[in-house]
Every structure is written in structure tokens, then in C-alpha cells.
Image (cartoon, grey):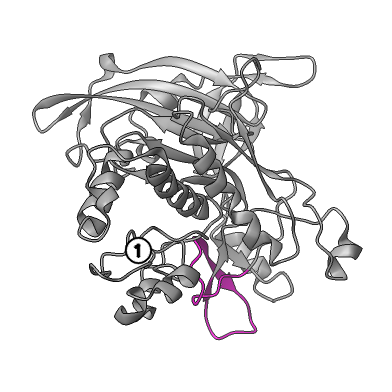
Amino acid sequence: VLITLSVQGERLYMHKKVYKTLCDPTSSLQASFNRNFTNPIWKSFKIKGTSAEGDVLVDLSSLFENDVKELNPFSSGAKNGGGGSQVGDLCMIMGVKTFPKNLQVRSQLGYNSGGEPLTVTMLRNIILLPEQPMRPRLADPRIGYFDEKKEYFTDKEDGVTSFSYIKRWDIRPTDSAAYARGELVEPSKHIVFYVDTAIPRKWRPYIKQGICDWNKAFKQIGFKDVIVVKDYPANDPDFDPDDIRYNCYRMITTKVENSVGPSCSDPRTGEIIQADVLFYYNSVKLLHNWEFVQTGAVDPRARAKVFDSDMTGNSLRYVAAHEVGHTLGLLHNFRASSTIPVDSLRSATFTAIYGTTPSIMDYARYNYVAQPGDKGVNLRPPHL
């Protein structure tokens, strides 16, 4: 939900901001557009106090304790039975964290779902968006980016037109003149990833390498050292992975066999303002089983019950690069591996140069096409 705030009398109003529909400001439609598209009031709260500076005090508890459709765990697509009715006396706020750019509220919500009790713990954030919106970039359907879909009113077209902004980081050169001359320059603001120190020490160098592999791609468009990798600070009381000023590669100690790379973006422009990679611990088991099944007939090392650190580490490097690709705005590219013929995947010369897929955003895991006797063929996941 994208909101703006206003104060009228003794109440603070939350307005749902119109951002998916735009109008050409030079067209004759602008006045009509302004009449038809307003920012409607979504919620209202009684002002309980006002400071000398004009700040207002309101109680937002109802926003996080009640069954608000836009913040409902069922409407968010969670796998929890498809729906439920809220039980009011089982709902409460469990904690609040405040940071310079976001406010995080932890709520316990009780439901009756299909006749059975269901308790959900949810984290919801109120995020302060940039005061000056980034200049957006139009999407191209031939390039796989997550996007923000828009509708555009203009008298230069017959009817409403649809387009999208890509989701991307606002990367700008420190020296625009040098950048224009084709020189490599550093960005005015780096993308810094903090790696969770709960990740076993033997695997962290590989994960860091996978994250930094993207600097090779940024170098191709004139930027050097865009991505910087650090460990979680040991003695920094201000550091918190829930603070959106920090991008984190987080260890999630559950049985889930997966890794994901979510990001938070400004819906007005598509600017990515924060991203995390969630590394579920049991994804190591998944990688082990994949490598065993897909390459065990060719590689005796893949038949071990426990792989050496280098085998597992190189797989984790691939996963890190893939998930960080998502945090940079890129979609999956499942078509990529279909471009490589089978005989090329059995070629040591070809796979040494090109790997098993031309895109790190593909799902080409290991070279299961290779056969016993294909000497020197590359079996591992590709690097970026």
C-alpha cells in the first residue's frame, strides 16, 4: 500500500496514493484526469497530541491488530489454507522497531481457518520513500526485469496506453564527465551486502565471491566496484538486518530447501531501495542431492555422503550470484539453456568457456547431459 498523510482538524488521514495511472501533463486531458483520479482516504486516526513543532501523536494499533485486507496474511498469498476469520482477542502487537527510514511492527494474529485455530506472526513495515523520486527507465519485453506496470493518458495516442518501469537500483557515476568519456568510475553510492556470520565460515568466501561476481557485469557498463561485501558487524549497536538501510545475505535455519532474493522498491519509479537474500540452511542438502543425481555417473566425488567444502562452495557461489541477480531486478531466464545443443554440453572445450547456460538467471544446475568418458567436461554450475 502506497500512502500519503494529511491532517484535518483533530484527525490524521491516510490516503491511498494513485501511482499506477499517469497523465501527460502537456495534454488537454490533465484537468479531467485530476478530477477522476484523487488519492482516496484509506484510514483515519484521532490525533491524541501535538508537539510545539507541529508533529502529531496517533495510535496506529488498529492498523496492525485488526483484519486489514491489504495487510492480511491470506491476501498476501501465504500458504495457510486459503483464508480464515480473525479472532480478535488472539491478536496483539508483540514489538516495534524504529529506524531512520522504516518502522517495523511485529504482530500476532489469531484466525479460525477451516474450523482449526491458526496463529500467524507477521512483520509489517512502514517505509519512508525517497523525497526525490528516481528518474524511471522504461521496460523492454525482450529483457527480463521485474517491473512496475503503468497506464498512461495522453491525447497523442488513441486510448489509454500501457507500459512498465523496470525495477533497478539508482546507480550514478561519481564523475559524470569521466563516465561520458567511457572511463571506469565508481558509483556515487555502492550496493553493500552484509553477509550473516551465522553462515558457516568455510562457505562464506564462496558466497561473497558469488555476490561480487556482478561487478564484472557492472564493469561492462562503465562502473567499478558497485557491489561491496562485508560481514555482519560484530560490535555495532546500530546494525540490525531489519533496518532497510542494510542489504543482507541472511541465514534462515529451517528445513526449507531453497534460497530467495526479495527486494523492496519504490512503486512510483521502480527504484530498488533495499534487498535481501534469504539462504535457507537446508538448501545445502538440496544442492548435494542435485549434484549426486545429475553428475554422480560421471564424477566419483559426487557420490560422497558429505561433499568437500570446495564442491559445496562452488554451488553456493552459483546460488549467491543467481539470487543477487533477483535483487538487482532480474527475472528468471528459463529459455537460456535451450540455446545450447546437447553435443556442446558434452564438449570439454565448449563448457570450459560457456558453462551450461548463457544466463546466470537460468535454472541450469549441473551438467547431467555429460556421459562417462566425456573427459574434462565442465559439470559444475556456471559463474556469471
Q: Is residue 67 visible?
A: yes
Seen in the picture, residue 339 relative to 80 is either above or below; the reply is below
Asked whether residue 258 is drawn in magenta, I would say no
> x and y percent of residue 59 in the render?
52, 18
> x and y percent of residue 219 in the render?
70, 62
Q: Residue at x 27, y 40 (%)?
A: 285
Q: Which residues are magenta?
A: 138-163
Q: Residue at x 23, y 21 (%)?
A: 87
40 relative position to 257: left or right: right
Q: Is residue 40 visible?
A: no
Residue at the left extreme? 115
> x and y percent of residue 182 in the render?
83, 70
What kind of residue is marked 1? Ala
Asked whether residue 142 is drawn in magenta, I would say yes
Q: Residue at x 51, y 72 (%)?
A: 143
For this rendering, which residue is in front, 278 or 360?
A: 360
